[in-house]
Amino acid sequence: MGMWFEIALWKRIFAAMTLGVIVGSIWGPGSESIAWIGTLFIRLIFMVVVPLVFVTLVSGVVSMGDPSRLGSLGVKTLAIYLATTLAAISIGLFLAATIQPGVGVDLSSTTPNEIQAAMPLSERLMSIIPSNPFAALAEGNILAIIFFALLLGVSLLTIGDKGKPIADLMEAGSHVMLRITHWVMEVAPLGVFALITSVAGNQGVVALLNVFTLALVILLGCILHMILVHGFFIMRFVLKLSPVMFFRGVRDAMMVAFSTSSSAATLPVSMSVAEENLGIKPIVASTVLPLGATINMDGTALYVGIGSVFAAQAFGYDLGMTDYILIAGTTTLVSIGTAAVPSASLFLIAAVMEVIGITPEQIAVVVGFLFTFDRPLDMLRTSINVGGDLSVSTAVANWEGEFDREIFDRPLKY
């Protein structure tokens, strides 16, 4: 047993994923019988999300000593999140227009799928202020939790020594929650194995073969976005850091994101690797990452853009430059309102396709077609979302002086 825990976590997770694909492909639909193990793992990591975000954010604000720094941090975070999202859409649209995955695709046999409306941006903004903070904690409303935690942290700063007992409690709580997160992560290989086995056994591998060109475009877009935007531009060009060390540091979080298909479920792991592998101080990790899990959807935006162009090509729509600009702008806005749960972005495609004139009936057919094989692609784009969150956090930590270069450059266990 000791040898098992001496193996680097990412290796254990990767082995579990590989074995899960093999077992699921052989076992088939019967693999659904162990899906409950994966569900149990997801429940364990969701269990720590809310208390971890809350206590680490309050503790981080108190450690800043100056509430005015929050304004600078927030502006930089939102600006770079929007910039990376727009870059992802641009890459996706370029690949979709060049490779044309929708040309020649026959959707006549596809069963239409009921379309759910995406949450309006105004409603998303309104939900930031909780009518009941305790209800927000119970419901896991991350934006509302961030808002209340910021207020509490700033208030503790303004009352000085009188707030020290609560500040100390929050600091101790952050250490406790990180320790619990580490314990939960030790069962990650088992949970990942069950999740991947279930997906491969039910639909994943075969479904992707049915739509190879579209899957290839999305995969290529995700790889290019991570390497060019986050690896080369942000890490190497802007921050003068090693892209290799960055990707090595985020691999655990990206693998958990791949297996769970949920940015929110991966949040505890993201916060852990941010501090321990990337050298990001708690104030940035506890602020930028939860916000990113809610509004930064690089992989989702890339997928929605490609999916919209795919639909237009399949139905014979001739898209001009204005249409591509509309797709890019609309996707940027709707990605902000994406729920951080599996397959949520499928229903955002409806809003984008409607903008370029695709009829509701055609939209329903496209959503039904994409739904068949969405899970494996959702796993891929979620890992890109999480990788983007950690890249932006590294940049903001650098600019705010909340970054430890020695930890970032420290060799990790292979």
Image (spheres, helix red, strand yellow):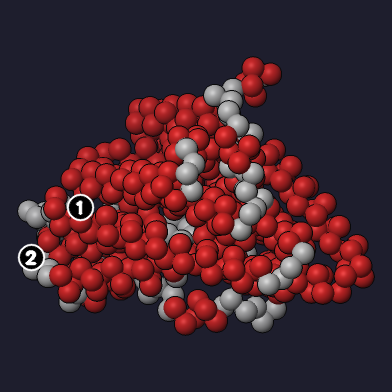
Q: Which mark is residue 226?
A: none
Q: Residue at x 57, y 78 (%)?
A: 127
Q: Residue type at mark 1?
A: Leu
At which x and y percent is residue 265?
56, 52
Q: Is residue 113 left or right of residue 256?
A: left
User: Can you say which quadrant of the picture contains the N terminus?
Assistant: top right
Q: Return the residue at label 2.
A: 316
Q: Quadrant of residue 27?
A: top left
At which x and y percent is residue 325?
23, 71
At which x and y percent is residue 95?
20, 52
Q: Is residue 216 left or right of residue 347?
A: left
Q: Residue at x 69, y 18 (%)?
A: 2
| Circle 2 SS class | loop
Q: Residue at x 23, y 43 (%)?
A: 216
Image height check: is 42 above or below 150? above
Q: Return the residue at label 1.
A: 95
Select label 2 or label 1 by which is in front. Answer: 1
Mark 2 and mark 1: Cα distance apart in space = 18 Å
Image height check: is 339 above or below 241? below
Q: Are marks 2 and 1 in contact (CB under 8 Å)?
A: no
| Circle 1 SS class | helix
Q: Which one is earlier in the sequence, the residue at label 2 or at label 1? A: 1
Q: Residue type at mark 2?
A: Gly
Q: Quadrant of residue 89?
A: bottom left
Q: Nearer the viewer, residue 303 or 233?
A: 233
Q: Nearer the viewer, residue 175 or 25?
A: 175
At which x and y percent is residue 326?
24, 74
Q: Is residue 129 left or right of residue 103?
A: right
